[in-house]
Amino acid sequence: MPVAERLLRTKPTERIVAEGGHGEGGELRRTMSLWQLTLFSVGATLGTGIFVILGQAVPKAGPAVVLSFTLAAVTALLSALSYAELAGTIPVSGSSYSYAYATLGELVAWVCGWCLMLEYAVSVAAVAVGWGEYLNAFLHSLFGVALPDAVTRSPGQDGGVVNVTAIAIVVLATWLLLRGTSESATANAVLVLVKIAVLLFFCAVAFTAFDAGNLDPFVPMGVAGVTAAASQVFFSYIGFDAASTAGEEARNPRRDLPLAIVLSLAVVTAVYVLVALAAVGALPWTDFEEEGAEASLSHIADLAVGATWPGLVVSFGAVVAIASVVLTVLYGQTRILFAMSRDGLVPRVFQRVGRRRVPVANTVIVAAFVSVLAGLVPLGQLAEATSIGTLFAFAIVNVGVLVLRHRRPDLPRGFRVPIFPATPVLGAVMCLLLMAGLGGTTWLAFTLWMLVGLICYFLYGYRHSRLNAEVG
């Protein structure tokens, strides 16, 4: 078979679904309910963004930042609906990697999987790096002490030696994942409920200082300001696809995965809009411009009450939020590698299932890699490139819906994208537009990442692919 045909070979959907849950030495256990899947997706999405993004977005849009969050939610929803259809049709752990394999061929699937590694592994390292800073802010507010820079900063940063706090949160998340999927889902549910409660607490405090005059003028920077802020806050919605990585451990995946994706996005959007409205109602938008990033939720909460304890509660919420993101995103990375290993594109060690029905070696290897990144590497522009990798994967999912509807209209679907084909087409276009708006340095980092990925594929994945082995 010619090389071009091998690269474009698709894996039959029925085969992908039939192999779901099977690994080397055992199978994954179906334990996750709709409730747990939804909170897993919320846990991966509702993170540090909302705690710090307002200070950067409000100066661009003014009080209309509320509309910016809504516009970003609509953009995310277009891709979320496509994810929901494919998750209900191909309910496996590979997420958009598996969807691409079924629709666009092996090479595109590999590229998509490589982008997901950028989205998950590198982003969780970046998030873990920030955990130490929030932990220090919380400890300083509570006890008046702070951990030394040597253990909270990476080498190359002022005073940094090894970011021990970043490694610590990754190790804690790894321990939970190794205990089992059910235990991890329960821990995440608790963390998610705590951070939602903290954000609702912020809203309650901020609304006590609400002044309708702070909303006038509502759109001081015009429509351009609203759209500019929407592009910035869009990345606060990245993570809703985490539920799709649990396709082989969901009790009723065809029904629950689409519902979990849509429900989680609805919950996150409602929280974001409510928090944004409370914040701009309590603090004049021009003060955000003057204070910049310092006009965080904790700062607003302190100003609203005239005391420091509300900010302490909000800082605690940020610490919990990051812990939840690390847990859920680390889980998602291991399940994607599990699916890729089953197809032969990465080594077999990533599909070995242990006594607790979890991929133990996979989890430990990913955690070790993430720990090295988080503890020793100032991530810089590479971390920013996670956004472009995510948008590329989202675009592929939208195209995948179009292709699968055309090629396999007979497949059972637990959910169908409404207003087809306009919704997936618009979703793909919006993703490409957001990618086009990213900076040159980000594009350079993304290009280098893709080149490394292609080298890895042709050196290993192409030669070990199960599909290629079958045709000789």
Image (cartoon, rainbow, N blue to C red):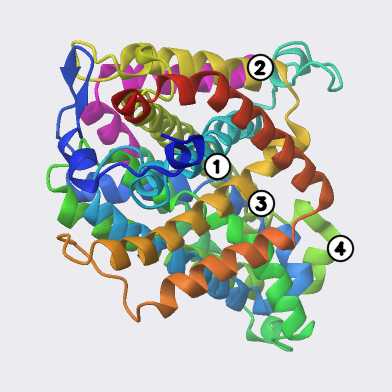
- Left or right of 462 in this view: 181: left
* Residue type (three-letter) at the residue carrying disc 4: Glu
Distance Cα–Cα, label 1 vs label 3: 9 Å
Which of marks 1 and 2 precedes in the sequence? 1
**Residue 28 appears in the figure:** yes
Residue labelled with disc 4: 290
Task: Find residue 318 and name its label.
Answer: 1
Quarter-of-image position of residue 271: bottom left
Q: Position of residue 383 (x, y in %)?
A: 68, 37
* Residue type (three-letter) at the residue carrying disc 1: Ala
Residue labelled with disc 3: 52
Local SS, label 2: helix
- Left or right of 56 in this view: 269: left
Viewer-nearest of discs 2 and 4: 2
- Left or right of 260 in this view: 371: right
* Residue type (three-letter) at the residue carrying disc 2: Gly
* Residue type (three-letter) at the residue carrying disc 3: Val
Which of marks 3 and 1 precedes in the sequence? 3
